[in-house]
Image (cartoon, grey):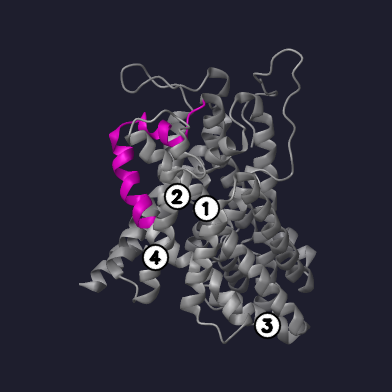
Amino acid sequence: MTTDRTADTTDTTAGERPPKWRIVGPGLVVAATGVGAADLVATLVAGAKFGYTLLWVAVLGAVIKVVLVEGAGRYSLATGRTIFEGWRSLGRWTTWYFAPYIVIWGLVYGATAMSSSALPLVALFPDLSLRWTAMAIGVVGLVLVWFGTYASFEKIMALLVGVMFVTVVGAALLATPNLGEIALGLRPIFPDDSVVNVLAIAGGVGGTITLAAYGYWLREKGWSTPAFMRVMRIDNAVAYVVTGVFVVAMLVVGAELYYSMGIAAETGDQALVQLSGILDERYGEVFGKVFLLGFFASSFSSLIGVWSGVSLMFADYVGNLRELPSGHPDTRTGGRFFRAYMLWLTFPPMLLLLLDEPIGLILAYGTLGALFMPFLAITLLVLLNKRREGALPHSDVPAEWRNGWISNGLLALCAVLFLALGINELRGVISDLVNLF
């Protein structure tokens, strides 16, 4: 994603070389965290229902996330402030929204992530208990992030992305994609009764709250000034090209192995277990087993990505409330607030694994989650533009890094899309409430 200037301006001093991009960076981390089992299932099911017709939506979803992540990264590099510090400058209402969101989201997500990571292992080793395997994986994720540095975390994520690439793209190649149909699938066409599918795929590809964590990973990497702006943009763009490859590959699998054969895809994570069985039947047992490893890599990369990135966001939130200086050790990787939220992500969710899903908590999770992506898009629109004197504080983004008309148009498109998706999700929550009472 680029802004409306033809060249970047950096803060490098005379004689200092601009920073160089490395293939593994925070962009790959945010992409790997965002592309979890749910994203793979959504595109697999879309391919199974509509063939290649919604391929353009998967590509659009990756582009949208480039826009949002670039905006979050640009704000952090241009100002030296975190995204939460930016939100707080907009008023107390952002704090009141963010506090319940991150607490409830973490509780429900922790249980979901652990179960999703355990499912492929239980499929590989049927004697394992799903519940206890999920808990063990949560503890493993906790230990890896608790005792690791950001550099070691980045290397683990790169390894998991490599496993995902080999297995997911390999499954697509095995399915022998129809290149002509793929080209036709890039045309923006809405099949009958598919508007909800379009919104879900475009909005779901590549993460939700983890997009806002990008700026924190930039800081942990040491990319903290405008000198890294060009590097950040390359890093972000390449990461979401990888994301696009993953989701397109899964749509190809759905189109070739389900749609063309008239097979109905299951919903939820079981769809990926079902796909493993289909690969077993068509290409031999080894291919199904290898795909389950890719399923695990996808789920576990999301788990440890959240354990790191969202814990950094929570730590920054607490640090701000306590008026600690920006970047205080307690708010960084390994800090006490960082580790406190990791414990919240790991152990309280285990109670949800032992009990039936509490409907009230799930409804609150759905309501707050539906509002987050519009919240991110709209607040980035405000933070990255010059504000009128009197209504709100002046933007602390230097003029050269503020939005131009292209950036504003793309962020506005994101806001409209996510508002529509959020309204649709809220309708589902209200429907569940009506049925409950």
Give the quadrant of the C terminus. Answer: bottom left
Circle number at residue 349: 4
| Camera-side mark, 4 or 1 | 1
Q: Residues within 10 Å of mark 1 (few under 14, many from 20)?
A: some
Q: Which residue is mark 2?
A: 339
Distance from disc 2 to disc 4, alpha carbons, whole Å, reads 16 Å
In the image, 143 versus 360, the foreground residue is 143
In terms of secondary structure, where does tag 4 sit?
helix
Q: Are marks 3 and 1 in contact (CB under 8 Å)?
A: no
Give the quadrant of the N terminus. Answer: top right
In the depicted structure, whether residue 415 falls above or below residue 137: above
Identity, as a three-letter code, of the amino acid under mark 4: Pro
Residue 170 location (% of width, % of height): 76, 68
Identity, as a three-letter code, of the amino acid under mark 2: Arg
Q: Earlier in the sequence, mark 1 or mark 2?
A: 1
Q: Are marks 1 and 2 in contact (CB under 8 Å)?
A: yes
Distance from disc 4 to disc 1, alpha carbons, whole Å, reads 18 Å
What stretch of residues is rendered in magenta? 80-105
Identity, as a three-letter code, of the amino acid under mark 3: Ile
Q: Which residue is mark 1?
A: 146
| Camera-side mark, 4 or 3 | 4
Distance from disc 2 to disc 3, alpha carbons, whole Å, reads 41 Å
Q: Residues within 10 Å of mark 3 (few under 14, many from 20)?
A: some
Q: Which residue is mark 3?
A: 278
Circle number at residue 345: none
**In the displayed image of the protein, which residue is found farthest to the top?**
14
| Camera-side mark, 2 or 3 | 2
Residue 161 location (% of width, % of height): 68, 57
